[in-house]
Amino acid sequence: MKLSLMQENLARGLQVVGRAVSSRATLPVLSNVLLRTEDAGLKLTTTNLEIGITCWVPGKIETDGSLTVPARLFADIVNSLPPGERVDLEADGATGLRIRSGRFRAHLKGIEADEFPAIPSAGERPTTRISQKVLRAALGEVTFAAASDESRPILTGVLTRFTGDRLTLAAADNYRIAVKSIDVLDPVEEKAVVVPARSYAELARILADVDDPLEVVLAPARNQVLFHVDGIDLITRLVDGQFPNYQQVLPTSHATRAVVDREELLKATRLSALIASSSANVVKLTVSPEGTGSIAVAANAEVGDNEGEIEATVEGDGITIAFNARFLAEVLQNMGDAQLALEFNGALSPGVIRPVGDPDYVHVIMPVRTAS
């Protein structure tokens, strides 16, 4: 293998695939990046056996070949080279790699390419396509609500349900549920899979804020789904199991509804969270009765207390309800809408947060039971 690439292109490719490098690899080769000449450039591949990422980097090939080298060390070396410089890569036997750029020389010892796990590529016809911008925004509103506790693996995933020209994403742990529906560009027969939230988080980093489409290849028979965009493939295994029927716990009515400015509520929540963090991390929302127009956000702990008041348009009865400060702040900071509607059915019933004018998103958050 012998080829030349531009430093900035190689650095970007290594940054993209670096997210799939195993940090606690049981197999030494999983700490490496696979380098393979292909399609007039260099194909970079990494995997942690849950996800695999492939990125194609344009370059001038003199001799074809493949090998693997330590991913993070290789990336650190490339990132240290001056931007705009040409980088020459040349295999030294089956496992060595010589790196040259300007007056710089380095040699890395790696592992043979044959020992690297096989990663499928986007050779199949796409199941559907989705706007990168639309999917990226939807993932931001949903994935944070998935569980991080591995005790119930199914809840560490995001339910991904295709129905015709619609895609519904749903994530839940024991305290909250986030559901978002978006349009897809090609209709799909009804199909549902559960994608690890960690995989979706990596996909969101790859997606650009543009309307250009992302290709999706569903392969439930292989327990995989593949995403392809702009010279990058991300393939992930699916989570086995039956996702809970979240629709059963989505409230269909409310006794109190308050419309507020999202940024103002987020600011008040973060201020109260400073006090709440020293205790049980609980903040209380007191919604004034219809016609008075305000919500008080407060926290009380041994270190002190605080209260902030924001304007609101209230319909229905007044209510005081308590939430985990982190859960409330997370949904507010991950939504992009200016106006939100808060809906309540009592101090011990789930609270609902919806964007005003957007019926395609709903977030349910469980209240905290307090002494008072």
Image: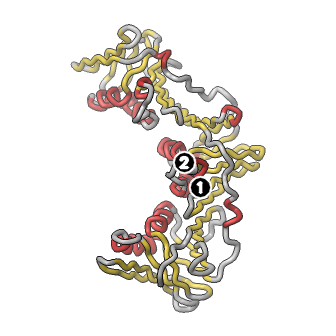
Task: Give how far across and how far down residue 66 sits, in percent.
Answer: 46, 15
At horizontal 60% and vertical 72% (from top left) the residue drawn is 350
159 to 179, vertically: above or below: above
What coloring was used for the rendering?
secondary structure
At horizontal 62% and vertical 69% (from top left) the residue drawn is 357
Q: Which residue is mark 1?
A: 171
Asked whether residue 134 is in view, the answer is no
Task: Give how far across and how far down residue 69 sits, in percent.
Answer: 38, 21
267 to 129, vertically: above or below: below
- In the image, 324 versus 205, the foreground residue is 324
Q: Is residue 4 left or right of residue 143?
A: left
Asked whether residue 126 is in view, the answer is yes
Mark sitting on residue 197: 2
- In the image, 97 versus 118, the foreground residue is 118
The answer to whether the residue labelled 2 contacts the one labelled 1, judged by CB atoms less than 8 Å apart, is: yes
At horizontal 36% and vertical 17% (from top left) the residue drawn is 89
Residue type (three-letter) at the residue carrying disc 1: Ala
